[in-house]
Image: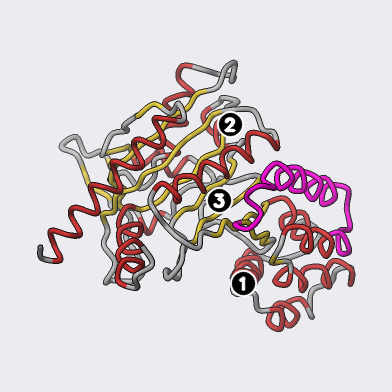
Amino acid sequence: MNSGLKEAETYEQVINTLSNTFSTYGFQRITTPAFERYDLYCKVTSSVNRKEMVKVIDPSGEVLVLRPDVTIPITQELSHAHRKLTSEHRFYYIQEVFRRASDPTEKTERTQAGIEYFCKRSPEVDAKTISLALETMKDLKFNDIKIEIGHTAFFHEMMSQLPLTELQSDQLKVCIQAKNSVEIGELLSNVDADDAIKHAITQIPHLYGKPEEVLKRAEEISTTSRMQETLSYIEEVCSRLKDLDEHLVLDFGLINRMDYYSGILFQGYVGRFGKPVLMGGRYDQLGHEFGADLPAIGFACEIESLVKASDNQKQKGDV
């Protein structure tokens, strides 16, 4: 069998496995239109980068975009029927998304699969969703699975106490993601702020590792009640994942590119693949963009990345 056929076969196996896993856990398949109004993504405060959108003009002159995201249109659709969450809703999807990448060698069209779990926030539900993410990667026969867990509130609470320009804020996020303590210190050296806060931010890259150890170190630099509440919440989530402890890593420098995440964040890694194969988190505020109160948590993965990661393991004899 040639490589193209093998890849196509793996592609279908991955899709079937994901569909079976999500269905088994009570998620209903849903689809969203391939073309959406450009306004949908422009009006949402924490939306997709406009430069990444693939725009087209329909015969009436209206600007449309090829679907750049799935979470936003699903949330909007649910908001038409429910202004307030009165019961849980579980959806999953497997469909194409279209985004222009900064790297010209990357494809604009990618197949994305994921779940959207509309439910009230709780450590129990968040732990169950993270557990499902791990179970999904196990069902795909991956080895050496790691789930990194973070939380938006810890970092944002620190940021709120600094008089930063938008440029400085963006630069700081890049340094945090790169775990570059030296550049963080240099960036903050001319900022007029409390030394304890500046010191705490330089420590964020070191808040990475086993949950118990990281929580202890985070406790030492926690300066506000909100930061303390966040640590307590993460501790509760991790306590419900004790049986999966070997797979868990805490990372307080975890920042997702989609700004609508507003709580716990997580991403999944597998052996012999250098980037996340799965990313997700809680987005309780997104429904507010459509005049509805629809707290939710979810995750997504790109089929192409899963296929590459699977092939890497097979080539190395890991499976």
**Residue designated by label 3:** 259
- Left or right: 159, with 127 as reference point: right
Give residue 8's position: percent from left, percent from top.
18, 54
Q: Which of 16 and 230 is in front in this view?
A: 16
N-terminal label among 1 and 3: 1
* CA–CA distance in space, label 1 to label 3: 16 Å
Residue type marked 3: Asp
Q: Which quarter of the figure has residue 254?
A: bottom right
Residue type marked 1: Gln
N-terminal label among 2 and 1: 1
Q: Which colour scheme is used?
A: secondary structure
Instruction: Look at the picture and state if 188 lies above or below 225.
Output: below
* CA–CA distance in space, label 2 to label 1: 28 Å
Give residue 318's position: percent from left, percent from top.
38, 67
Q: Which of 223 and 212 is in front in this view?
A: 212
Q: What element carries label 3?
A: loop
Residue type marked 2: His
Residue projecting furthest to the left: 1
Q: Is mark 2 on a helix, strand or loop?
A: helix
**Residue designated by label 1:** 171
Q: Nearer the viewer, residue 31 or 248?
A: 248
Task: Classify the position of the N terminus by image quarter.
Answer: bottom left
The answer to whether the residues at label 2 and label 1 have Cβ atoms under 8 Å apart is no
The answer to whether the residues at label 1 and label 3 have Cβ atoms under 8 Å apart is no
**Residue designated by label 2:** 288
Taking the spot 20% from the left edge, 59% from the top edge, the residue there is: 7
Residues in magenta?
219-247
* CA–CA distance in space, label 2 to label 3: 14 Å
- Left or right: 23, with 269 as reference point: left
- Left or right: 87, with 51 as reference point: right
